[in-house]
Amino acid sequence: MRRTFGNVISYFLPKRRDIRYIFSINSGRAGSGYLAELLGTAERATAFHEAEPTMTGAYLDMINKRPYQETFRLRRIKEHAIRKISRTLPPGGIYCETNHMFIKTFFDVIVRGFDNVELVILRRDLSHVLKSFIELGYFSPKNTAWPDWMSSPNAVTAALPCIGTDSVLDQYDLCVGYLFDIEARTLRFQREYPQVRTHEVRIEDLSNYANVEALFSALRIVPTSATRELTGQRINARSKSKKGYDNPADLSYCRDRIVRYQKLASEKGIVLPATAALSSIP
């Protein structure tokens, strides 16, 4: 009851027009934690990697099984939570969140609930992302947490047909299907919300301070001395977890599986997004 009452109160409070909002579209395992740390060093910025509610679990199940419009009201809980946080920010404050659930479970409530929204589309070489997914046991029985975070490539809300049902695909094909669907969801977002400014960047480029400065300039945020100090200090919050799953993956094989998926998709008449980060990074 208390949470419901709080949500009702936040609904009727006036919007703070002086607050700006920066979110990220990314697949997960693409450097979103590092991006959050970087954004948090900017003047007047308050940054989160995955602020509560994270919009996982039941909310992910909703978008896997039902169209977005059917669950919109329930998913507005994220809007209410952010509105509460925004009331604590200083004048001209900037709310940043790099949660990869944005493009899956709450992009629509944010765009309809807030003004002054901008997005960082964060990409990482797809073969490296796939390798990380495999080693962490995503889309496999080795990891029991991933179903709360990773949407099915056959979700009702998917933006791209998959080459097969979840039950017939192996771990690699499920991961690749998911990654291409995230890219397709990104393109769909840009088509449906052309008024939202988007800024595309590769995580590999953000180890260079000049590129960080360029991103900050595009976002109209001001770096600090902490920005320069943090640049290049890559954050890998799952490095220890990979050892626990004992599921090493070969990068060359990951590249081969991406190529194989592309071939199978082409044979089925599925047009995969050409914007995915497919170039090889040594």
Image (tube, helix red, strand yellow):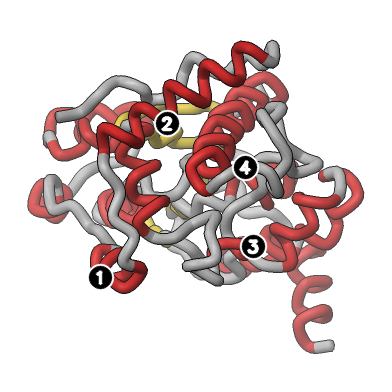
Q: Is residue 126 visible?
A: yes
Q: Are marks 3 and 2 in contact (CB under 8 Å)?
A: no
* Residue type indicated by callout 2: Arg
Distance from the alpha carbon under mark 4 to that under mark 2: 12 Å
Helix, strand or loop status at disc 2:
helix
Helix, strand or loop status at disc 3:
loop
Q: Are marks 4 and 3 in contact (CB under 8 Å)?
A: no
Q: Is residue 43 visible?
A: no
Q: Are marks 1 and 2 in contact (CB under 8 Å)?
A: no
The vertical placement of 101 against 120, above or below, is: below
Q: Earlier in the sequence, mark 1 or mark 3?
A: 3
Pointer 1 local density, CA inside 10 Å: few below 14, some 14–19, many at least 20:
few
* Residue type indicated by callout 4: Leu
Where does label 3 land, which residue?
55
Between circles 3 and 2, the one closer to the viewer is: 2
In the displayed structure image, the side of residue 93 where residue 229 appears, left or right: left
Q: Residue 169's mark?
A: 4
Distance from the alpha carbon under mark 3 to that under mark 2: 30 Å
The percent coordinates of residue 232 (x first, y second) are 12, 46
Where does label 1 land, which residue?
240
